[in-house]
């Protein structure tokens, strides 16, 4: 048998070159992504350094706009100045929400808290000033405006101080960031050098992998050309073009050596082949004789039973004659139908014959009942599916209580629209045939049911009571015939409460 070639990522020189290029490009891409990410992060940090100063300046500008709009309203009482005041007030309150409002141990955050607190007082005072102006309370709005202006100056001084502190802090951060950028620049240069060295290493490995096998092959071929056929087999390092040539060279040497060996052993091989052919012919003849003998024995049994039935008639032994005829029909059906399908009527008749034979053996102790719908006798089914179920009901169900035992055969034709219909079993047909073999005997546990359906019954256990066709045989033949699974199920209410074996078979709409 030809040895299967091992799979290799390096199946060709072109593949290896492509891999080296791809790896180099991936390394370069990774390096560029790394640099881009670091530069982008640095830019974001630079942007964020002086954001706090911009926010403080915006806060200062908005505060000034509020003060200016209140002043204009007091002097002109214009609606535009009042509208500007309310707009700047809302903007200023939104900016205040971004300031610290907690008690912390930080000079900057303490300043933010003080600015926020004074600004809330300032906004309340501006509101009093505007309301007094609108109410034409001159003394009141003048007094309120002076308090407002005083708060405005305090807030401005605090904002100026906060801005200076933030600028100093941000300047220090900026210097730290510049140092980090210098380190990043040096690191990027180092990464580029490493990527360059790795690419050179990959190329060196690739070239060596291509040149070394060619050198070894050239040297060995030179020795073979000089007449030395005892050179060792060359190793196939990679399944590439050089590997194909090397493998061909090895096969050529092996073919030459094998050809010489075949010339020496040709007569012995021919003799062994002739001896094997004679042995196969002898085995074939023996198998044919056994097959013919297997055909003769059943016919001899049927003829003997029929002869016994005729002899019983001549002696006026009608019951014996009927028994022998039933035995002959039963065995003839079993042998004739085992490898083909049959009608449901013939299957039921075979089960009747089996029960009759058992009742003769056991003095009529087995009660046999049938509930069969009309018009189902001509439905085609696999042969020998009912008798094994009846036999299992006798052997494993009512064997220990034959006098009180009862076996019931139910055959019902179900309609998809009118009846309960096992759609999970026969989803595409209009009708389904439900065959149930029920006994009132020993019953089964769920574990036992699972073992039977999964064919986990020990052979010794099965042989203790039954010599018929095993349940697994029926299940397998049903699956093969209908090309479906789960056509047979077993139900029992527990030990001592009987067993029900139910077969649900698909029936085409035009079965009649």
Image: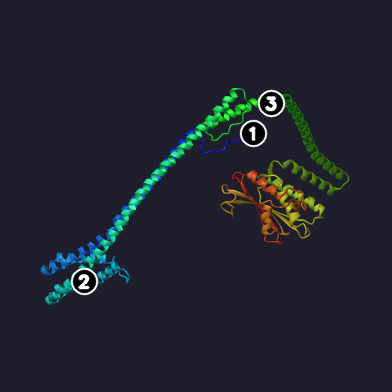
The structure residue drawn at horizontal position 77% and vertical position 42%, both measured from the top left corner, is 332
The Cα atoms of the two marked residues, 1 and 2, are separated by 98 Å
Quarter of the view holding residue 47: bottom left
Q: Is residue 378 visible?
A: no
Please name the residue that numbered disc 2 is placed on: 122
Judged from this view, the residue extending furthest toward the top is 226
What's the CA distance linking mark 3 and mark 1?
A: 19 Å
Q: Nearer the viewer, mark 3 or mark 1?
A: 3
Judging depth in this view, the residue of 259 and 405 nearest the camera is 259
**Alpha carbon distance from label 2 to label 3:** 113 Å
Judging by the rendered image, the residue that carries numbered circle 1 is 1
- Give the left or right position of residue 437, taking residue 185 as reference: right
Up/down of 402 relative to 509, above or below: below
Name the quadrant containing residue 20: top left
Residue 16 location in percent, x, y?
48, 36
**Residue 261: which disc?**
3
Q: Are marks 2 and 3 in contact (CB under 8 Å)?
A: no
């Amino acid at each position: 048998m030809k040895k299967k070639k091992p799979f290799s990522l390096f199946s060709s020189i072109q593949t290896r070159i492509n891999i080296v290029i791809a790896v180099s490009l991936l390394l370069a891409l990774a390096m560029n992504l790394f640099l881009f990410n670091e530069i982008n992060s640095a830019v974001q940090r630079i942007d964020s350094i002086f954001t706090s100063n911009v926010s403080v300046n915006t806060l200062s500008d908005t505060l000034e706009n509020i003060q200016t709009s209140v002043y204009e309203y007091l002097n002109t009482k214009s609606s535009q100045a009042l509208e500007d005041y309310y707009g700047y007030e809302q903007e200023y309150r939104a900016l205040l929400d971004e300031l610290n409002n907690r008690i912390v141990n930080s000079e900057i955050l303490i300043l933010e808290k003080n600015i926020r607190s004074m600004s809330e007082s300032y906004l309340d005072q501006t509101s009093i000033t505007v309301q007094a102006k609108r109410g034409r309370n001159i003394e009141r709005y003048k007094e309120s405006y002076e308090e407002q202006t005083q708060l405005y100056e305090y807030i401005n001084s605090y904002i100026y101080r906060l801005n200076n502190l933030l600028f100093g802090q941000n300047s220090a951060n900026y210097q730290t960031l510049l140092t980090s950028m210098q380190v990043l620049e040096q690191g990027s240069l180092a990464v580029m050098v490493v990527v360059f060295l790795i690419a050179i290493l990959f190329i060196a490995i690739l070239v060596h992998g291509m040149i070394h096998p060619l050198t070894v092959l050239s040297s060995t071929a030179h020795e073979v050309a000089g007449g030395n056929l005892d050179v060792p087999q060359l190793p196939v390092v990679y399944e590439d073009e050089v590997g194909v040539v090397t493998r061909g060279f090895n096969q050529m040497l092996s073919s030459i050596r094998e050809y010489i060996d075949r010339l020496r052993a040709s007569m012995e091989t021919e003799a062994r082949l002739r001896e094997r052919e004679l042995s196969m012919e002898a085995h074939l003849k023996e198998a044919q004789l056994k097959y013919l003998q297997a055909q003769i024995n059943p016919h001899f049994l049927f003829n003997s039973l029929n002869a016994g039935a005729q002899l019983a008639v001549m002696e006026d032994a009608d019951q014996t004659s009927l028994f022998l005829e039933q035995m002959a029909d039963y065995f003839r059906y079993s042998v004739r139908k085992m490898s083909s399908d049959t009608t449901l009527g013939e299957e039921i008749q075979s089960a009747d014959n089996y029960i009759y034979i058992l009742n003769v053996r056991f003095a009529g102790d087995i009660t046999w009942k049938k509930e069969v719908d009309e018009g189902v006798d001509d439905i085609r089914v696999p042969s020998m599916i009912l008798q094994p179920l009846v036999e299992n009901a006798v052997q494993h169900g009512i064997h220990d209580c034959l006098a009180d035992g009862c076996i019931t055969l139910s055959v019902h034709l179900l309609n998809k629209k009118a009846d309960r219909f096992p759609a999970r079993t026969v989803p595409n047909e209009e009708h389904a045939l439900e065959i149930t073999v029920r006994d009132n005997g020993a019953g089964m546990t769920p574990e036992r049911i699972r073992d039977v359906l999964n064919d986990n019954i020990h052979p010794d256990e099965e042989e203790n009571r039954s010599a018929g066709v095993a349940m697994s045989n029926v299940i397998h033949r049903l699956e093969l015939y209908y090309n479906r699974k789960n056509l047979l199920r077993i139900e029992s209410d527990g030990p001592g409460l009987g067993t029900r074996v139910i077969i649900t078979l698909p029936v085409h709409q035009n079965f009649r």
